[in-house]
Image (cartoon, grey):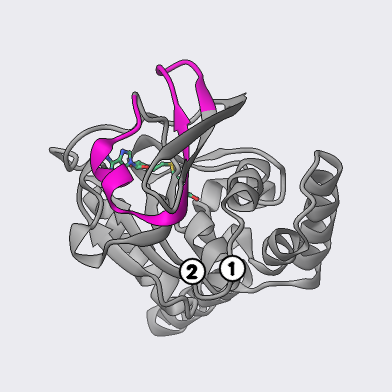
């Protein structure tokens, strides 16, 4: 009797798991609505809209928030961090002007959602996360989903000098300043997109590194990101 009950329990658990992992027609429908919303908010790049329309965002979220995966909002993930709002992901990606094969350094892997958008656009992605549990879970998730981004556990302020220079650098946390070491790892002719400012609010900033090595800084709209903090996190949250 106990054996049958146990088998049933395992069967129910497996079905629930498979349901949440599936990309159902309902998910696809909700995603179409999300794409329409961010288009209305001003995203014009078809390549970005296509990537957002293709990626099952619910697979990047904690179970408690699955129902909300296709709302244009940021939600909590592990280690007191957030999965960025789809509009913000689209906005930053559009600013980067991704071309097929671009070598992109991302600071702040988090859930891996932004990483997957870059991968869908055929970029070669290198991504750094300072929280070990997030780094480990997201590395596994990206591999399982078939994305071949190179993931690193470390401090994004330092970048990845051994893989530099990068065509594009994307910072997905609010930086107190533009890190010198990241500027040095940007290719001549490259672009960096980084939200810069204090905790409460940051200014989306585009840094162009011209072919002669000079920099041009363009400040855009205001956003609010989780902070970019120095060094690896000391303990698991
Ligand atoms: N791109 C992510 C956004 C996650 S929020 C997504 O789509 O889900 C920003 C992430 O930046 C957090 O996971 C945070 O831990 C990380 N972060 C903050 N400071 C960092 C640093 N110095 N180096 C690497 N990652 C950092």
Is there CB contact under 8 Å for labels 1 and 2?
yes
Residue under numbered circle 2: 102
* Relative image position of residue 11 (x, y in whole percent): 52, 80
SS at mark 1? loop
Q: Quadrant of the C terminus?
A: top left
Rendered residue at 45%/42% (across/down): 172
SS at mark 2? loop
Q: Quadrant of residue 234?
A: top left
Q: In terms of depth relative to the viewer, which is nearer, 190 or 122?
A: 190
Rendered residue at 20%/58% (across/down): 161
Q: Which mark is residue 99?
A: 1
Left or right of residue 8: residue 221: right
CA gap, disc 1 to disc 2? 6 Å
Q: Say whether residue 169 is magenta.
A: no
Is residue 195 placed above or below 158 in the rendered structure?
above
Q: Which residues are magenta?
A: 177-203
Q: Residue furthest front?
A: 212
Ligand 1 has an atom within 8 Å of the beta carbon of the residue at disc 1:
no
Is residue 22 placed above or below 189 in the rendered structure?
below
Q: Quadrant of the N terminus?
A: bottom left
């Amino acid at each position: 009797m106990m054996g049958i009950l146990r088998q049933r329990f395992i069967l129910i658990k497996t079905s629930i798991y498979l349901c949440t992992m599936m990309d159902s027609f309902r998910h696809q429908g909700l995603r179409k609505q999300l794409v329409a919303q961010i288009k209305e908010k001003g995203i014009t790049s078809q390549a970005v809209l296509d990537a957002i329309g293709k990626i099952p965002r619910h697979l990047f979220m904690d179970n408690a928030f699955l129902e909300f995966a296709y709302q244009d909002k940021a939600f909590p993930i592990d280690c007191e961090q957030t999965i960025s709002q789809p509009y913000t992901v689209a906005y930053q990606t559009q600013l980067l002007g991704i071309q097929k094969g671009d070598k992109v350094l991302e600071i702040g892997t988090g859930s891996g959602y932004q990483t997957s958008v870059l991968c869908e656009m055929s970029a070669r992605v290198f991504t750094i996360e300072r929280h070990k549990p997030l780094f480990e879970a997201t590395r596994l998730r990206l591999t399982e989903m078939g994305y071949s981004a190179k993931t690193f556990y470390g401090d994004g302020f330092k970048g990845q000098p051994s893989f530099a220079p990068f065509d594009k650098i994307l910072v997905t946390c609010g930086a107190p300043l533009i890190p010198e070491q990241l500027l040095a790892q940007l290719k001549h002719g490259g672009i960096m997109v980084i939200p810069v400012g204090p905790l409460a609010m940051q200014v989306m900033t585009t840094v162009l590194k011209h072919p002669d090595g000079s920099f041009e800084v363009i400040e855009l709209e205001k956003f609010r990101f989780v902070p970019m903090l120095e060094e690896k996190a000391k303990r698991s949250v």
